[in-house]
Amino acid sequence: MLRNRSRKPASQHRGSDEKPREQGTRQGNMPPLGELKEIFERIRQETGHSPDIIIREVELKDASTEISLAAAVVFLNGLSNEKSINHFVMESLMKFKPDEEVISDKRRLMESLLKHSLSFGEAIIENEWNDLILALLSGDTVVLIEGCDQVLIIGTQGGEWRSVTEPSSQLVVRGPKDSFVESIGTNISLIRRRIKNPDLWLESMKIGSVTHTHVAIMYLEGVVDKQLVKEIKRRLKDIQIDGVLESAYIEEFIQDATFTPFPTVFNTERPDVAAGNLLEGKVVLLVDGTPFVLVLPTVFAQFFQSPEDYAQRSDISLLMRLIRYISFIILLLGPSVYIALTTFHYEMIPSLLLVNFMAQREGVPFPAFIEAMLMEITFEILREAGVRMPRAIGQTVSIVGALILGQAVVEAGIITPIMVIVVALTGIASFAIPAYNLSIAGRLFRFYFMVLGGMFGFYGITLGLIALVAHMNSLRSFGVPYLSPISPFVLQSQKDIIFRFPMWMQKSPDQSGNKQEKIRVAEEVLPQRKDSGSDHNPAKP
Amino acid sequence: MGKNRSHWVEALRGLLLLICLFGVLFLTGCWDAKELNKRAVVSGIGIDLAKGEEKYLVSLQIIIADEISGKIGRGATPTTVYQARGKTIIDAIRNTSRKVPRLVSPAQARMIVMSEDVAREGVAGIVDFLDRDSDIRLTAKVYVVKRGVSAGDIVSALTPIGKITGYALAQKTDLASQELGENYSVEVDDVIRGMLIPEGGPVLNGLTIDGDVKAGGKKSSLESSISPGMVQLYRMAVFKGDKMQLWLSEEENRGLVWIKNKMKKSVIVIPSPKDGGDISLEVMRSRTRMKASLNDPEHPVIRFSVMTQFSIREVNSNIDLRNPYELQTMEQTVQQVIQKQMQTVVDKAQSIKCDMFTFSEAMERADPVQWKKIKNKWGQIFPRVKVEYHVDAVIRNSQMRDRSFKYYTNSEQ
């Protein structure tokens, strides 16, 4: 397992660590000096005598010289790889023969243990107490030697993780079938495996004053905009939160605009998507404990791109992409257009269709708007129930909900059949959009358009669309206009927005990245980046 | 911490504003929202002349959607007719609300029928209403009903094919103009444009009922396979200004269609050059050009050039159609037939001094300066306009056969 273990963040997270609440019960960041027994006591006390902290005392003894030295191996049961502790750490310690020369100088002794005896790849000497505890809690093994103010930290992180499986929310017919898992190390390895390049840089930090969640920033040096990385790091550092359990926690802190239903940060559970975005000069944020990684910055059109597009022929991709855009429009406007047509603009309906509509409406008690609201809310209830239904009864509910309820409601004459069709169509259209968070935004705006369509007809819908586009135009994702490259229009970037040009017509990744850097970080955009950063982030100190 | 707070205040203020704005929405009401089951959708309007001060009798053909595609129909007629009288059309329509339980919505009306009496009295007010009303489409078709049948009869007639008479009639008109070549469909905007022709007027389609006039409105008429009273297209009615002048004959109708360049398909029967048997030629393609020449403004000339292609559809003769001379003879005959058709209608128009062909427009386009000189006395000049015809007819094919089987029976003898 490839693991990223940067020691640098120790100084980084210190800032957020030193909160008064935390320091009250602890002895601060004192070096672990003193009797082993005292140190054990300190560890036990700070972890609340948790029984899963294993302290294994050993004696380093050289039979020939009769020198013996007390030492201890401390690790967290369950989080660390016990096999490697047994095989390498314990065995190395048992076989370690302290030299007479170094026995007096404990620091040199520790170094000698690390350099000459320990048969384990990942190990480092530390002398700060917080690092010791954090390493312990991350699954590393800590080796203590009597009288030494330094500890040896051995990277034995392990324990049980979900293995790499097929993605569950972003499926493709053709394309890689692996997905990220909850382990950040695995996730980084999945990306690194795809981009074997020294320019793929990784920075990491710990966020969350309680959870100390490992967050990694990945980007392709030379392609990425340096200012973007700087800005992302700045925003990440400003986060004050006790726990990060999902990348969405981070997303909310670092996004430009808080009060918009539109996602301004892209997320994916697919390593190929993450790698593709890295090649485009975007920054990928990985958060430990979640399979969803963040991609910054993003534009509206990106939410309509599916990894499938690149696995199918370009003309077919165009069709699929158009279908997605059309679905989004249906999702937004389907019920509202129906309401507006039937209650305001009956003259626009083809005559025979109008006769059909009228025959259906005959005897239905509710106005079209109420009818649409009822059906849409019912549909949302069904969907919400379906999401967290135990799998065994999920099917029952979908049959009851979709078939029986739908049919009964029509037969009872409460809802017109055409309304069921419209609602079902919008419901299905919402699933055609590859990004779930955008489809939720569309579902929300659908109600807004229904109100407008029900009150003002097409006039209201038009006004609503104007307001919507204006709002979307005002959005920025890390300074990048949300609707770019459509607005502002950039001809060079059209090759992968609505059309997916054949691969050979698109520029090689490096070039496109550079181009994009120039385009997207246009000069007029940069000042706004600073503004939006401080304005919209409520967590800023 | 202080800045965090201000953010919340800001957000809260925004939210409050949003809620207030949302509340405003409810104050406005719903403008002109009308549910479909509160509308009476009109498919046709009939206008008759009545006696008395309320001189118009308006018949509204209203669709009963239930009877057409609903599950809860009562077996009644698919459309129903509401009639009311009024001083003007809109007055009469408003008067129908005493009978109609729903809002009369004429936007889907495709048929506007006027009785001959109305047409002869003048239709300016009616056309203004059709033009002014925000609902009625300018693409609705306008008809005149032959005397003896009232517009109400047409509007209340039922048709075996197509449940809504208004729509069926619109289809009949289009189809007849496409297949028969004796009329062309005239819509509200054509009528308005026709009325604006100096010394001219629109030409409207005529309607009549074939059979029992009153039977067509009964549901029982649909129960016999030969409908006792069927609405059918009649000849066309010529207007001068807003008043109807006369009905054209069938030959004049054809001539008008040729002149207006509306000919799509039409059958012309000519005698065979060999033995005089009937040969039916059908127009495949046709184009008519009208050119005006105003070299002598007092004696303007209009030149028609018609280019048509024919196909032979029916032969009752032992003629050998492989022979190009025979074909040429036939072409010449048919050219004369077409020219005569055009001539009769032009003669008729000149005799009643009604420029229904927009000669004036052609002249204005050809020579605007000269046109201004004669514009004022166009009424006197029009009957004197010299019209030249150049018809070029080509027989393109004879369908699946060249000679009729009659050719062989004759040669054996």
Image: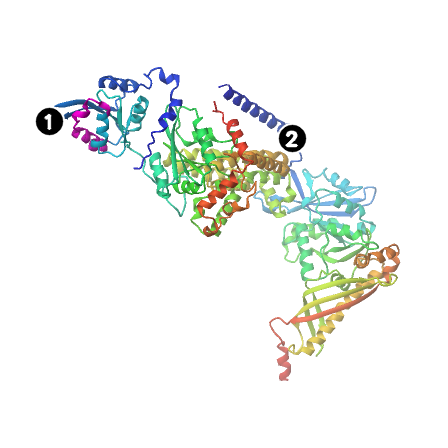
Q: Nearer the viewer, residue A518 or A489?
A: A518
Q: Is residue A57 magenta?
A: no
Q: Is residue B402 above or below residue A520?
A: below
Percent x, y for residue A230? Answer: 45, 32
Which quadrant would residue B212 be assigned to in this image?
bottom right
Q: Which residue is mark 1?
A: A64
Q: Is residue A305 above or below residue B288?
A: above
Q: Residue furthest left?
A: A64
Relative horizontal placement of residue B53, taking residue A154 as reference (left or right): right
Q: Residue furthest top?
A: A24
- As measured in the structure, the alpha-carbon distance from the residue carrying label 2 to the one carrying label 1 is 100 Å
Please rate how many residues cluster around mark 2, counting C-alpha atoms within 10 Å: few if below 14, some from 14 to 19, many from 20. few
Q: Amino acid at mark 2?
A: Gly
Chain for disc number 1: A
Q: Amino acid at mark 1?
A: Ser
Percent x, y for residue B172? Answer: 67, 56
Q: Is residue B344 visible?
A: yes
Q: Are marks 2 and 1 on the same chain?
A: no
Q: Is residue B116 visible?
A: no
Which quadrant would residue B95 be assigned to in this image?
top right
Chain for disc number 2: B
Q: Which residue is mark 2?
A: B29
Relative horizontal placement of residue A178, taking residue A104 as reference (left or right): right
Quadrant into which the C terminus of chain B falls: bottom right
Q: Nearer the viewer, residue A147 or A538?
A: A147
Q: Nearer the viewer, residue A234 or B140?
A: A234
Tell me the magenta residue range: A82-107
Q: Nearer the viewer, mark 2 or mark 1?
A: 1
SS for tag 2? loop
